[in-house]
Image (tube, coloured by chain):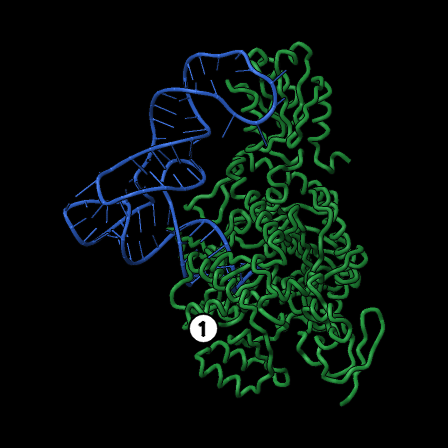
Amino acid sequence: MAQITLTFPDGNSRSFEAGITPAEVAAGISSSLAKKAISATVNGAHWDLQWPIAEDASIAIHTMKDDAQALELIRHDCAHIMARAVQEIWPEVKVTIGPVIENGFYYDFDREEPFTPEDLGAIEKKMKEIINRRDPVTTEIWERDRAVAYYEANNEPYKVELVGMIPEGQPIRMYWHGHWQDLCRGPHFQNTGQVPADGFKLMSVAGAYWRGDSNRPMLQRIYGVAFKTKDDLKKHLLMLEEAAKRDHRKLGREMELFHMQEEAPGQVFWHPNGWRIYTTLQDYMRRRQFEAGYVEVNTPQVVDRRLWEASGHWEKYQEHMFIVEVDEEHAREKTINALKPMNCPCHVQIFNQGLKSYRDLPLRMAEFGSCNRYEPSGALHGIMRVRGFTQDDAHIFCREDQIESETERFIALLSSIYRDLGFESFRVKFSDRPEKRAGSDEVWDKAEGALKAATEAAGYDFELNPGEGAFYGPKLEFVLTDAIGRDWQCGTLQVDFVLPERLDANFIAEDGAKHRPVMLHRAILGSFERFIGILIESFAGKLPFWLAPRQVVVASIVSGADGFVHEVVAALKAAGVRAEADIRNEKINYKVREHSAVGKVPVILAVGMKEVDERTVSVRRLGEKETRSATLDEIVAQLRAEALAPDLAR
RNA sequence: GCCGCAGUAGCUCAGUGGUAGAGCGCACCCUUGGUAAGGGUGAGGUCGGGAGUUCAAUCCUCCCCUGCGGCACCA
C-alpha cells in the first residue's frame, strides 16, 4: 500500500496508508477523539469521517465544538431525515434536493396534495423517531448507470435528472441512513442519532420551482431551522419574534406613517408622519449631494415609447412598464407612452441639450426620480418592494479616466451618509463581466480595474460576484447590516458604456473632436420607500431624534397646566422642533404609554402645577426609566440642537 | 407571474346555512390623576368583489381582486 503524509493543524505531520479515513486517523490519536469526531477538513474540503484519503493532505478533525462544521452536518442531516420521514409517511412522494441554508435547511418534494401545518407536526414527530433509532449512516460510490437504473426503478425522476447532471469524473455518491437512501455529496454524521432531537423545528411550506426555473414544475418546499441545542433554537425563534415586532408594515400603521390599499397596489399613501420622515431625509440628501458637487434636475413622468425604444428598455422591460395610451380626439395616431421606470434616458436628454465640453465633466446629475415599474404581484412587499417609488438617483457623465476618482468620491459620500443615518459599517460587493455583455474586453478591463482600485483606495474590501455585472458594465453594490443582523442592499454604482452610445451622448474633448462620455449610475439609499422601511425596521420605529416624525409631546398632568403646555410647544416649534401638545383628559400614565410604546415619540415633556410654578418641564426620554427636570430655556436650547440633521450639526 | 394560506368594525381577532360579536381605538360623560392602560355610556359592519347552489349565503361552490409566506423577477 502506498503511503501518504497527513499534516495536522499544529503543523505536525505523520505518514499513513493511502485510503485511510479520518475516522481511523482520529482513532489513532485517541479513543476520546474517535468518539467525539464528527467530520474533518481535508485540503480545505469538508470531509466525511468515512471517506478515504488518497493523497498527501492537510487534515483537521472536527468535533461538535466546531460550530461551522457541526451546524452544517446537523442541518444537512436534518434535511435528509426530513425527506426520509416524509417518504416513510407518504411513500409516493418524490424527493428532489435538500440543501443547508442560513439557520437551517429545506427539502423540495413533489406531491399532489399540499402539505398542511398538521403534516409538519407529523413529519417532525417522525423525524424525532428516526433520530432516536440512531441508524448508521453509510456511503458508497456508484456507477452512473447503476444510479440511473436504481432511481428509474424507484420512480424518482428528479433524482434521475440529478444523476445525469453530475459531471463526468465526479463521484456519484450515495448515502444510506438506515434503509433509506439518497444521492448526496455529503458529508454526514455517522448515525442519525447525532442530530440533536430538540434543536430543530419545521417552519413553513412554500412553493419552489424545480431547479429554480419558472418554466419547470412547482415543487413543495418545507423549510426548517436547526441548531446544536434547544437553547440556540429558542434564541433563534425569539429573534424571529423580534423581527416581527419591527415589521415596518405593523409599525407604519401604529405610528401612522403610511398606508396602502388595493386600488393602488404597490404604491404608498404617505400620511403626515411618514411624509415628515421622507421630506427630512430628502432635504438631507439634497444638501449632501449639493455639497458633493451634484446638480439637481427633474424629468417627465410620461414619456413616449420612442425614447424607451432608443434606450433599449422597451425591448427588454416592456412587460414591466406601466403603459399610458393617449387617444386624443384630434391626434392622427394614438400615442403610446410609458411611465418612466428609470431616470437615466431622461438625464441623457438633458445632457444632450447644447454641446458639452470636456470642461463640463464630470457632470453629476441628480434627481429624486419618481419611477413606476409594474413589478410582478408576488414581488410586492410593504413599502420595501413597490410599483411606485422615488430613487435618490444620479448619473455621472465622465471620461473613462475619471471613473476611478468619481467612484472614490462616491464611496466617500455614501459612507458618510450611511454613518449619519446610523449605519456604522457596510459591505461592498463587486460584480464583474457577465457572459452576455456589450463592449470590448479592453473597455471592461479598464472599468473593472477602476472600480476595484477605487474601492481599495477608499479602504474597503469587496466580495466578488463573478459574472453578475449588468450587460452594460460592472457594478458595485453596498450592503448595510441592520440592528438585528439582517443585510440590506441599498447603494449601487454601475458603469455604463452602452446608454451614452444608444442615445448618442457626446462631448468635445481637448482634441476638438467628439467623444463618448461614460455614465455612472449611482444611488445611495436606493429608493426612499425601501430605505425608510429599512430605517423603521432597523430602529424598531425608534428613529433618531432628527428623523423622528413626532419629536416631542408636551403632556399636561393636570388641566391647570394646559396654558403652559401651549407655551412650551410654541417655544419648541419656534426653535425648529416638531412638538405637539397633549392636553387630553387622560392620566399621565396613559399619555406616556401611548406616545412611547405606540407612537415611539423620543421625548415626552410632562407638565404639572409644580412645573408651571417653576417654568420647568419633566423630561422623559424614550426607553429611559428616569425622568429629569429642565427649565424651559434649557430644554428648548437642547432640543433645538438635537433636531438638527447631522450635516447641519457639524 | 407560480405554489400554498388568508380577507368579518379604524386595529387585533372570535363566530354561525336563518343578514354578527369581543378587546383596543373613537365620541360623550364622570374623574384633575405625577411618568408604559382610571370608570361609565354610546356610535361604528354591503362579513374583499362578482356569479352560482339554496326557501334562505358572511358561512357551501366557482371566478376575480388584494394581502401574507416562499419561488421566480428586480433595468
| Chain letter for the part of the structure drawn in green | A
In x, y percent, where is residue A66? 71, 62
Seen as rendered, the residue at the extreme bottom is A1
Chain under label 1? A
- Three-letter code for the amino acid on which mark 1 is drawn: Lys
Q: In this view, does A356 lie to the left or right of B11?
A: right
Question: Residue A562 at x, y = what percent?
Answer: 57, 14
Q: Which of the image's four quarters has the N terminus of chain A? A: bottom right
Label 1 crowd bin: few (<14), some (14–19), many (20+), radius 10 Å: many
Residue A303, image x, y percentages = 51, 54
**Which quadrant is home to the C terminus of chain A?**
top right
In this figure, which residue is indicated by the disc labeled 1? A94
The x and y percentages for residue A173 are 59, 80
User: Is A5 on the left or on the right of A588, as rendered?
Assistant: right
Question: Taking the image as drawn, is residue A588 in sight?
Answer: yes
Q: Name the foreground residue: A350 vs A32.
A: A32
In the image, residue A529 above or below residue A220: above
Q: In which quarter of the image is residue A9?
A: bottom right
Say which residue appears at 44% left-offset and 44% top-offset: A261
Front-most of residues A85 and A144: A85
Q: Of all residues shown, which one is farthest toward the front? A: A31
Image quadrant in which you'd find residue A248: top right
Q: Quadrant of residue A141?
A: bottom right
Q: Chain B is which colour?
A: blue
Secondary element at image label 1: strand
- Give me the residue at 79% from left, 78% from top: A6
Judge by depth and name the residue closer to the eye, A18 or B58: A18
